[in-house]
Amino acid sequence: MGRSQQTFSKSEKEKKRLKKREEKRKKMEARKLAKEENGSAGIPLAYVDHNGNLTDTPPDPSMKVKVKAKNIELGIPKKENIEEELDPIRNGKVSFFNSSKGYGFILDTATNEKYFTHISGIIDEIAENDKVTFELEKGQRGMNAVKVKKA
C-alpha cells in the first residue's frame, strides 16, 4: 500500500500560498473601491522644488535655473592636488584605547574625525581621554594616526 505524497509541510506551504493570494486579491479590490470613491487616478504627483525637496505643488517657474549641458560633470570629478598643511602635527583626544589588544582611536580636535592608531605608532604610553599630538599616515583602510605623543 502506497503512502500519501501529501506531507504536513507541503500542506502548510500550500495554505500559506493560498492565504497570500487571497490577501493580495483583497488589497487589489480595496484599491479599486477607493479609486472609484475618490475619483482619483491613483498615485498622486510629486514635484521637485528649486531646493531639491519633494512637494505636492508645482514649482515656481521664476525660480528655475538654467544649466548648460557642458557644465554637468558625469562621474567622479578629478581629485585636485591638495597641498599638505604646513604643520603636519595634529592635536586630538584618545576616544578609545585597548592596551591588551594594542589599538585605539583618536578624535581630531580640529576636524572631529576619528583616526585608528596601533601600538606600533605610539611613542608615549596613552590611555582613554588623554590629549595627544599625532601625525597622519595612509593605511590600508584610510588614514592612521602615527607618532602619537601625550600633549
Image (cartoon, rainbow, N blue to C red):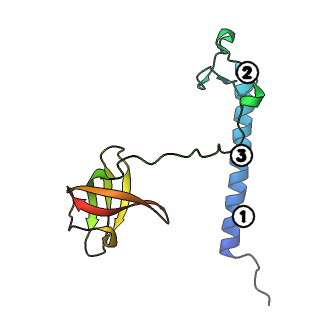
- The amino acid pointed to by label 3 is Lys
Q: Residues within 10 Å of mark 3 (few under 14, many from 20)?
A: few
Q: Which residue in the structure is indicated by mark 3? A: 24
Q: Quadrant of residue 56?
A: top right
Report x, y in % for residue 77. Answer: 65, 42
Report x, y in % for residue 132. Answer: 24, 56
| Mark toward the start of the polypeptide (1 vs 3) | 1
What secondary structure is marked by label 1? helix
- The amino acid pointed to by label 1 is Glu
What secondary structure is marked by label 2? loop
Q: Measure the C-alpha gap from mark 1 to mark 3.
A: 15 Å
Quadrant for the N terminus in the image: bottom right
Residue that appears at 38% across and 49% down? 113
Disc number for residue 67: none
Question: Which dot, 3 or 2, sits closer to the camera?
Answer: 2
Q: Residues within 10 Å of mark 2 (few under 14, many from 20)?
A: few
Q: From the viewer's perspective, is 98 left or right of 6? A: left
Report x, y in % for residue 96. Answer: 28, 60
Q: Measure the C-alpha gap from mark 2 to mark 1.
A: 37 Å
Q: Which residue in the structure is indicated by mark 1? A: 14
Quadrant for the C terminus in the image: bottom left
Q: Is residue 114 above or below residue 67?
A: below
Disc number for residue 40: 2
Q: Quadrant of residue 137?
A: bottom left
Residue ranking furthest to the right: 1
Q: Is residue 33 above or below residue 141?
A: above
The reply to whether discs 3 and 2 touch (Cβ–Cβ < 8 Å) is no
Residue that appears at 70% across and 41% down? 26
Residue ranking furthest to the front: 86
Q: Quadrant of residue 14?
A: bottom right
